Amino acid sequence: MNIRIQAPCPPSPSSAFSPRFHHKTPLILRRVICSSEGGSHVVLQTEGSSDVSNSSVTISKHKRTFGWSKKQSLLKQPLNKDPMPLRALLTSSTQDTSASIVNDGKIGVLLLNLGGPETLDDVQPFLFNLFADPDIIRLPRLFRFLQKPLAQFISVARAPKSKEGYASIGGGSPLRQITDAQAKELRKALYEKNVAAEVYVGMRYWHPFTEEAIEQIKKDGVNKLVVLPLYPQFSISTSGSSLRLLESIFREDEYLVNMQHTVIPSWYQREGYIKAMANLIEKELKSFDRPEKVMIFFSAHGVPLAYVEEAGDPYKAEMEECVDLIMEELERRKIDNPYTLAYQSRVGPVEWLKPYTDETIIELGEKGVKSLLAVPISFVSEHIETLEEIDVEYKELALKSGIEKWGRVPALGCEPTFILDLADAVIESLPYVGAMAVSNLEARQSLVPLGSVEELLATYDSQRRELPAPVTVWEWGWTKSAETWNGRAAMLAVLVLLFLEVSTGEGFLHQWGVLPLQLPMFP
Ligand SMILES: C=CC1=C(C)c2cc3[nH]c(cc4nc(cc5[nH]c(cc1n2)c(C)c5CCC(=O)O)C(CCC(=O)O)=C4C)c(C)c3C=C
Ligand SMILES: [Fe+2]
């Protein structure tokens, strides 16, 4: 499907980008550019091989260490160097139409995030919420009713291991505190840029739940909402999941159906974000004796490979482009260290995005790398996977593998350049709030990458395909391998057993105390 744009491009941003995803391989990515000069429109289309899993670790200064070639160069886009001059519009008392967009209502910004257990007792119910999410495990339609029993089973089975991790970082996740601080700083930054907006935090799997944030938004009478997932890169499993939840909340609520909103789906390509990341890396490199010798090691949270290859998740493409942009920024500063990207935190035995962080560290050690700077890249707060997995597990592995000097770049948190850039992103999106309500479909399409929740979800997942099960109890998985059908049969058998167990309240899981008699619902 090519996108034909008839409506004039909006005045800003100067370029807009949206990968359009197909669910079948080969993956086809399309890019829409709205040129600010003269309102002209360009539609680029590129086809690339679907083989996004091949990956090899090579150490060279400029060679990428993952398998992506043609697509990547076409995905390059100029950074938005020309933030919209809304400040003047906002302060003006004689307003034009753009100005009235901003002042003509109560503005809210909804930050979407994952959420994390605050105490060890929260860990199992938090995991239950995570695994009950159909964007983490999507059962075939016929078996949807088993989602919660299955989530209960997996969360109980995984809780001891997760609890150990959370215990080692102080007994809970720091996510709520950090996200609240980011919200506060963003509100301040917006205020300093003359935009009065309330900032809300809506978590997907723990307090404050998105539902709670939405209640507050309604109570406060917000009528223009900017939805900003706190994930720089889009994934079905993160921003996608939160947007899907929002979609269902919006659909059922008359107030929300009528509330104007817009969504910023991903923002890894923003100049402020890229510069903020480059600043952190530059600073951390200076702590090494020989900074120019340090391998910059980007470590992103993984997703199961099938998300990318079968469901069309743009996560990998966005991640690779993000790394390229950061490296280009560093090169402009005359920092041209070797670098690599790998994926961490896989859960269960299905194949996840490669190369894996642990295997890559070992390989780098074998190849003689002596200094390594780890850069967490998929998330903007410290969390269990930076504080425990990277700082403890991967560091230990690196030192064992022959790497002598280890460093780690902190997560962005409330870093001022970053927060100011988020504020700019919000301000730049304000003219789009409500524009999505226009009925002309083609006009809507010209507004990518900003989009209404429904519009966005339709672009990446119109068929709502089955997603692979990433967890241990589902050893067999839904993959494209020759084992697929055997696996599905085995999985069906497990589901039937589980169903019988849950419906009768009797069976081996109850005997072993894995399943309680009463299944807790959404806490
Ligand atoms: C961009 C970031 C993330 C992606 C992509 C992602 C996908 C994903 N995660 C799981 C399973 C788990 N994630 C867990 C914690 C967790 N995940 C992210 C981010 C992404 N997840 C964060 C920031 C956190 C930590 C929150 C915190 O409390 O600090 C956990 C729980 C921890 C554990 O037991 O290891 C699980 C489980 C899957 C299956 C998945 C993609 C399908
Ligand atoms: Fe995760």
Image (cartoon, rainbow, N blue to C red):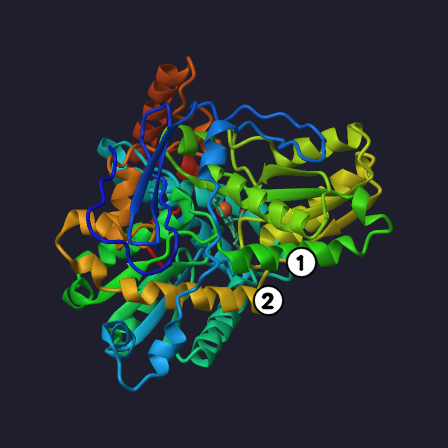
The residue to which callout 1 is attached is 280
| Dot 2 amino acid type | Glu
Coordinates of residue 475 in the picture (x, y in percent): 47, 26
Work out which residue is located at the far top of the displayed protein and give it: 482
**Nearest the camera: 135 or 148?**
135
Label 1 CB sits under 8 Å from any ligand 1 atom: no
Quadrant of the rendered structure where residue 224 is? bottom left
What residue sits 39% from the left and 31% below the top? 468
On the rendered structure, is 498 left or right of 268? left
Q: Residue at the location (54% across, 64% down)?
A: 418
Vertical comparison of 508 with 299: above or below: above
Looking at the rendered image, the quarter that the C terminus falls into is bottom left
| Mark 2 CB near ligand 1 (8 Å cut) | no
Q: Residue 376 has which mark? A: none
**Horizontal and vertical percent for residue 403?**
81, 39
Is the C-beta separation of discs 1 and 2 under 8 Å?
yes
Residue 415's label in the rendered image is 2
Secondary structure under the numbered disc 1 in the rendered image: helix
Asked if 418 appears above or below 69 in the picture, the reply is below
Q: Is residue 471 visible?
A: no
Q: Amino acid at mark 1?
A: Leu
State the image coordinates of residue 491 (x, y, percent, origin top left). Answer: 36, 25
Q: Quadrant of residue 135?
A: top left
Q: Secondary structure at mark 2?
A: loop
